[in-house]
């Protein structure tokens, strides 16, 4: 069983031919309202990957939470455990998506930052998860305290996605069992410009003395570079027609956890998660683009890949 501790938002997305310049107004295309937030996306990916998943999050009793809940209550294998805030609105995000599939996102975190460690701990004690997934759309204090639980939940593996990146991550990056980030976040964390798989491999090779955990850097269409047992390797990406990258990283995290929980080794788990992400970027939307397990298995079978 998986517990995701993280953000839940209502996403407002507009598809546009190109991003507007400063001071410019463009008439965009399709407008979509959908559930989102890195925590919810990762929980949905874990659940659609076949694992019973709980999401601990903070929301308000407002129309945005009602809108999100109306969607997620239809999902199988996921249970959302909301902690209601009286101080802030449910988180929301505003997303611009261009014709190349690139996005620009602005988040108003609202209640997401109100989630307290005491509320999280009380629920974790009851659930006793095998995997704990969390991201940086929470307060710094909560993120640091979650990692202190490694001694209390000895059987649990901790998956940390340091997005959006904040400087305090440098003090805790070697603590989670799995540290998963994109090339931009890795560049900031390691103070190195990572533009290619060779840059990523060299960066991870330089870490071997200090990092005993699994470190993964996702490189979009260039694949994934990972450090496992002191060895850095590169796995190429699946080539697909990318139209929207919004939830690709979250899909990767959720499916990676699900694959490892199924007993797959690290390499096969990454390939499995890459396949899920490849399907995700070939569709529009965040929540709606995350594939189901049968789709991922079919995608791999069609390519003659067994994992």
Image (spheres, rainbow, N blue to C red):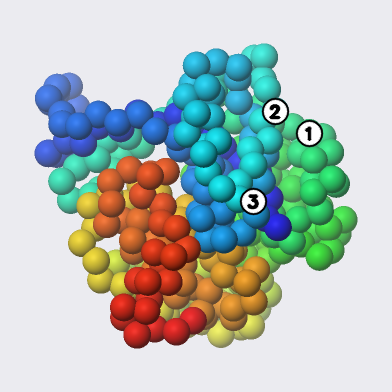
Dividing the image into 4 quarters, which one contains the N terminus?
A: bottom right
- Pick the residue in front: 226 or 38: 38
Pinpoint residue 60: horizontal percent, then vertical percent: 60, 20
Q: Which residue is mark 2?
A: 83
Is the residue 282 above or below the residue 222 in the image? above
Q: Which residue is mark 3?
A: 53
Residue 198 shows in the view: no
- Pick the residue in front: 150 or 47: 47
Pinpoint residue 121: horizontal percent, then vertical percent: 81, 41
Q: CA distance from mark 2 to mark 1?
A: 8 Å
Q: In the drawing, does residue 75 fall left or right of residue 261?
A: left
The earlier-in-sequence mark between 2 and 1 is 2
Residue 219 shows in the view: yes
Q: CA distance from mark 2 to mark 3?
A: 17 Å
Q: Tags 2 and 1 in contact by the CB under 8 Å rule? A: yes
Q: Tags 2 and 3 in contact by the CB under 8 Å rule? A: no
Q: Residue at x 12, y 26 (%)?
A: 26
Q: For residue 119, which numbered disc appears in the image?
A: 1
Q: In the drawing, does residue 12 fall left or right of residue 112?
A: left
Within 10 Å of disc 3 (Cα), the crowding (few <14, some 14-19, many 20+) is many
Q: For residue 193, which numbered disc appears in the image?
A: none
The earlier-in-sequence mark between 2 and 3 is 3
SS of the residue under disc 2? strand
SS of the residue under disc 3? strand
Please tell me whether mark 2 or mark 3 is closer to you in this view. 3
Is the residue 178 above or below the residue 108 in the image? below
Q: Residue at x 79, y 49 (%)?
A: 127
């Amino acid at each position: 069983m998986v517990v995701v501790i993280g953000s839940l938002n209502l996403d407002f997305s507009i598809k546009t031919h190109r991003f507007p310049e400063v001071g410019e107004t463009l008439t965009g295309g399709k407008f979509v309202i959908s559930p989102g937030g890195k925590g919810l996306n990762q929980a949905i990916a874990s659940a659609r990957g076949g694992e019973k998943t709980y999401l601990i999050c903070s929301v308000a009793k407002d129309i945005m939470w009602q809108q999100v809940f109306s969607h997620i209550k239809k999902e199988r294998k996921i249970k959302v455990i909301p902690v209601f805030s009286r101080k802030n609105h449910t988180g929301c995000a505003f997303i611009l998506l261009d014709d190349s599939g690139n996005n620009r996102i602005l988040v108003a975190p609202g209640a997401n930052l109100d989630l307290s460690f005491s509320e999280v701990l009380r629920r974790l004690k009851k659930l006793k998860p095998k995997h704990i997934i969390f991201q940086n759309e929470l307060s710094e204090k909560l993120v640091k305290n979650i990692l202190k639980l490694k001694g209390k939940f000895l059987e649990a593996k901790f998956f940390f996605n340091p997005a959006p990146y904040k400087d305090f991550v440098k003090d805790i990056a070697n603590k989670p069992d799995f540290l998963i980030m994109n090339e931009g976040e890795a560049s900031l964390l390691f103070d190195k410009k990572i533009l290619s798989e060779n840059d990523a491999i060299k960066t991870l090779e330089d870490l071997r003395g200090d990092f005993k955990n699994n470190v993964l850097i996702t490189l979009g269409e260039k694949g994934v570079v990972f450090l496992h047992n002191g060895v850095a390797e590169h796995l190429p990406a699946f080539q697909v027609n990318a139209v929207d990258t919004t939830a690709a990283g979250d899909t990767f995290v959720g499916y990676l956890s699900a694959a490892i929980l199924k007993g797959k080794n690290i390499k096969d788990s990454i390939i499995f998660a890459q396949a899920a992400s490849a399907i995700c970027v070939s569709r529009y939307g965040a929540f709606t683009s995350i594939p189901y397990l049968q789709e991922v298995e079919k995608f791999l079978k069609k390519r003659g890949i067994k994992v």
